[in-house]
Amino acid sequence: EPEVTQTPSHQVTQMGQEVILRCVPISNHLYFYWYRQILGQKVEFLVSFYNNEISEKSEIFDDQFSVERPDGSNFTLKIRSTKLEDSAMYFCASTGARGQPQHFGDGTRLSIL
Amino acid sequence: GQQVMQIPQYQHVQEGEDFTTYCNSSTTLSNIQWYKQRPGGHPVFLIQLVKSGEVKKQKRLTFQFGEAKKNSSLHITATQTTDVGTYFCADPYSGGGADGLTFGKGTHLIIQP
């Protein structure tokens, strides 16, 4: 069964540095998402991406964050000037149609020191 | 913003006992999705409910959607250790855009053998 893949599985970064989290969505999917889950808390929506542009973003997704689909397969989340509170699990998800079930990757655990 | 409230936050049961989690929304939902997240894992789609009063079953799991489409429940009969995890309900039409999921806080199911 097709999967969403994310790399790296764990990223450790000094506060203030930039990180790029990478995702390869399922190949025939059209909608792509990033979510964040702080340890022990619920999954929070960050941003959705469709037709090569941001479709929707949450209050969390401020100027510190950006997304890109640099080629036909990768979908990236960039976090600039990381802060301690950015430490969380970041999940990428994709789906083939609006409102349909989303398929999640295994996540990237981001640890900011 | 739109929220889905979920109770209880934690549920301890003896193996073999039943388990129920409840999800409530302040607004009418177009549909609702349920996801399971194993400890250390990523959310995995379980089911989507669309119709008012809909009931769907997956083996020992029974999902219901309220008549007013403002609440939903997940019931597990005769829990097994493989049922351990966090169960989230999610609204797939949170912001009117490309539908980032609005998750409830989840119910952590803990099973004592």
Image (cartoon, grey):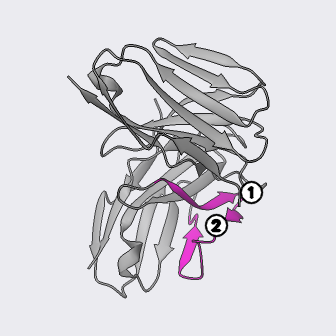
Q: How crowded is mark 2: few (under 14 residues within 10 Å), some or many (20 or more)?
A: some
Q: Position of residue B59 (x, y in %)?
A: 47, 11
* B32 left or right of B37 in image: right
Q: Position of residue A5 (x, y in %)?
A: 42, 48
Camera-side residue: B65 or B34? B65
Find disc 2 in the rendering and name its residue. Answer: A58
- Quarter of the rendering containing residue B77: top left
Residue range (magenta): A42-70
Q: Amino acid under label 1?
A: Gly
Tell me, yes or no, whether the two marked residues, 2 and 1, touch with CB atoms within 8 Å. Answer: yes
Residue, x 53% and y 54% (percent of image)?
A: A73
Is residue A24 visible to the viewer in this orientation of the structure? no
- Quarter of the rendering containing residue B15: top left
Which image quadrant: the C terminus of chain B?
A: top left
Camera-side residue: A94 or B69? B69
Residue A62 part of the magenta-drawn span = yes
Find disc 1 in the rendering and name its residue. Answer: B95
Tag 2 secondary structure: loop
The chain that hosts pointer 1 is: B
* A65 left or right of A29 in image: left
* B54 left or right of A86 in image: right
* B33 left or right of A56 in image: left
Which image quadrant: the N terminus of chain B?
A: bottom right
Q: Are marks 2 and 1 on the same chain?
A: no
Measured Cα–Cα span from mark 2 to mark 1: 9 Å
Reply above or below: B89 against B20: below
Q: Where is residue A74 in the image (x, y as percent from the top left)?
A: 51, 58
Q: How crowded is mark 1: few (under 14 residues within 10 Å), some or many (20 or more)?
A: some
Residue, x 71% and y 41% (percent of image)?
A: A99
Q: Amino acid under label 2?
A: Ser
Residue, x 37% and y 88% (percent of image)?
A: A16
